[in-house]
Amino acid sequence: MIARFGPIAGNLVYHAIEFLLKGALIDKFDEAAREKFRHNLPKLWQRYKTERNNPALDKFDQTISSSSTNLTEFVTRKKKFDLGCSPRSVS
């Protein structure tokens, strides 16, 4: 039963990273500017790295890119798959 909710955990992690990055950029951008990033994690990540100017952050580039690709793939395909997550299927 729990396996049916697998994609939810990934989505929560994605949003946690997004909010962490937006929070870290709060001093640099007002709310309207932060909203322009929408949910574009790679764009947020690049801006965060630019602001921090720390080459050690480069090692996370692939992780950010993969998580963004995986979430985008899930969101675009979720209509094609019955994930068993509808309220009626939960017992």
Image (cartoon, rainbow, N blue to C red):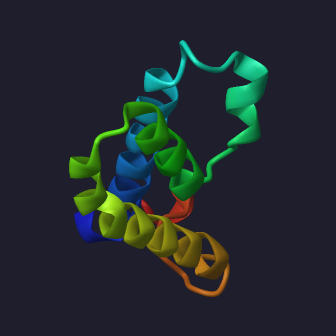
Q: Position of residue 8 (x, y in %)?
A: 40, 56
Q: Position of residue 77 (x, y in %)?
A: 61, 82
Q: Is residue 15 left or right of residue 82?
A: left
Q: Is residue 80 above or below residue 59?
A: below
Quadrant of the drawing holding the C terminus: bottom left
Residue 91 in sight here? no
Q: Position of residue 53 (x, y in %)?
A: 37, 38
Q: Is residue 54 above or below residue 58?
A: above
Q: Residue furthest bottom?
A: 80
Q: Relative to the observer, which residue lies in front, 77 or 62?
A: 62
Q: Is residue 64 above or below residue 31?
A: below
Q: Quadrant of residue 67?
A: bottom left
Q: Is residue 66 left or right of residue 69?
A: left
Q: Is residue 31 above or below residue 72?
A: above
Q: Residue at x 68, y 42 (%)?
A: 37
Q: Residue at x 26, y 70 (%)?
A: 3
Quadrant of the drawing holding the N terminus: bottom left
What is the count of numbered marks?
Answer: 0
Q: Position of residue 4 (x, y in %)?
A: 35, 69
Q: Is residue 77 left or right of residue 16?
A: right
Residue 59 in sight here? yes
Q: Relative to the observer, which residue lies in front, 89 or 53?
A: 53
Q: Residue at x 36, y 59 (%)?
A: 10
Q: Relative to the observer, which residue lies in front, 41 or 49?
A: 49
Q: Residue at x 44, y 54 (%)?
A: 11
Q: Is residue 19 left or right of residue 64?
A: right
